[in-house]
Image: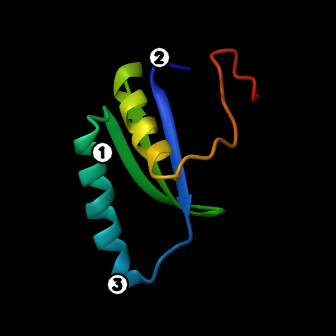
Amino acid sequence: MDNTIDFDLTMPVPAADKQERIKEDCKKIADLFEASATAMFEGQDGLIFHLEFDDAAKFGKFAEYLRFHGLLRVDAIHTKSDKIH
């Protein structure tokens, strides 16, 4: 495991004509919160928007935005020991 803070947002796979717009919006979010890396891919549970933060303060700013708007739910926390809590 590296020292980044990773965040995955899973959403239902939208219609093909809406996917490009969602990708553009997610890129804007990544830029706004200064994510060090971003990716979007289709997974088993839906479309996954992946962000990596190289700084806890940047992630904190992003998490606070989500919390403020009622959008934050924590499903699991992975630590450096690779345990799921």
Distance between the Cα atoms at labels 2 and 3?
36 Å
Distance between the Cα atoms at labels 1 and 3?
22 Å
Quadrant for residue 16, please give it. bottom left
Residue 65 position, x and y percent, is: 40, 42
Apparent side of residue 83 relative to residue 22 in the rendered image (left or right): right
| Residue pointed to by mark 1 | 30
| Residue pointed to by mark 2 | 3
Name the residue rendered at 34%, 84% in the picture. Answer: 17
Where residue 17 is drawn, which disc sits there?
Answer: 3
- Residue 28 or residue 19, whichever sits in front: 28
Position of the C terminus by quadrant: top right
Q: How is the image coloured?
A: rainbow
10 up-or-down from 21: above or below: above
- Residue 74 or residue 9, whichever sits in front: 74
Apparent side of residue 62 relative to residue 43 in the rendered image (left or right): left
- The amino acid beneath tag 1 is Ala
Name the residue rendered at 52%, 53% in the picture. Answer: 71
- Residue 82 or residue 11, whichever sits in front: 11
**Local secondary structure at mark 2:** loop
